[in-house]
Amino acid sequence: MGYQQRQLQSKRVATYASLQARRPYSRTPKATKDVQAKSKRLMREMLVFWKKNEKEERDVRKRENKEAADRAKVEEEKREAARQARKLEFLISQTELYSHFVGNKLKSEHLMKLSVPCKLMS
């Protein structure tokens, strides 16, 4: 590093150091008041943001819960419909079996009645 570069760098550091040294004394009551007002405004904006954000999250959760409940209700209705269909099918099959059994019994009784007089005649 050359002499001129070192001089230039030393000058920059000295200028920056003097600015930093004067900074605490350069604050005026107006600057402090502006900082306080800005801080209050930012605080209000953040409060509004988080309230809005929490409301949106609450709405999303509510909507998801409602959709889940609706899906569960639809699934339950499908299961109930399938159960009712199985129950109906069982009742129909039992009715058919019973009617077939009764029909066969009536046929056999009818044949027996027809066959008994024939034996008496012979």
Image (cartoon, rainbow, N blue to C red):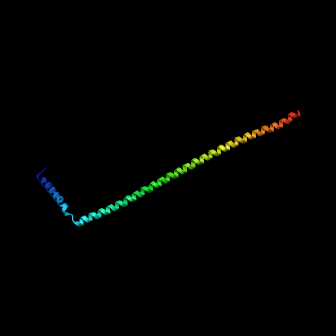
- Up the image or down, 71 lies above or below 52; here it is above
Left or right, 116 with respect to 9, comes to right
Query: Residue reaching furthest bottom?
Result: 30
Camera-nearest residue between 18 and 47: 47
Q: Position of residue 103 (x, y in %)?
A: 75, 41
Residue for point 47% across, 55% down: 63
Q: Position of residue 35 (x, y in %)?
A: 26, 63
Query: Residue reaching furthest top?
Result: 122
Residue for point 36% across, 60% down: 47
How many marks are shown on the rendered structure? 0
Q: Position of residue 26 (x, y in %)?
A: 19, 63
- Up the image or down, 68 lies above or below 116; here it is below
Q: Position of residue 114 (x, y in %)?
A: 83, 37
Dividing the image into 4 quarters, which one contains the C terminus?
top right
Residue for point 52% across, 50% down: 72
Query: Residue reaching furthest left?
Result: 3
Q: Quadrant of residue 102?
A: top right
Residue for point 19% across, 61% down: 24
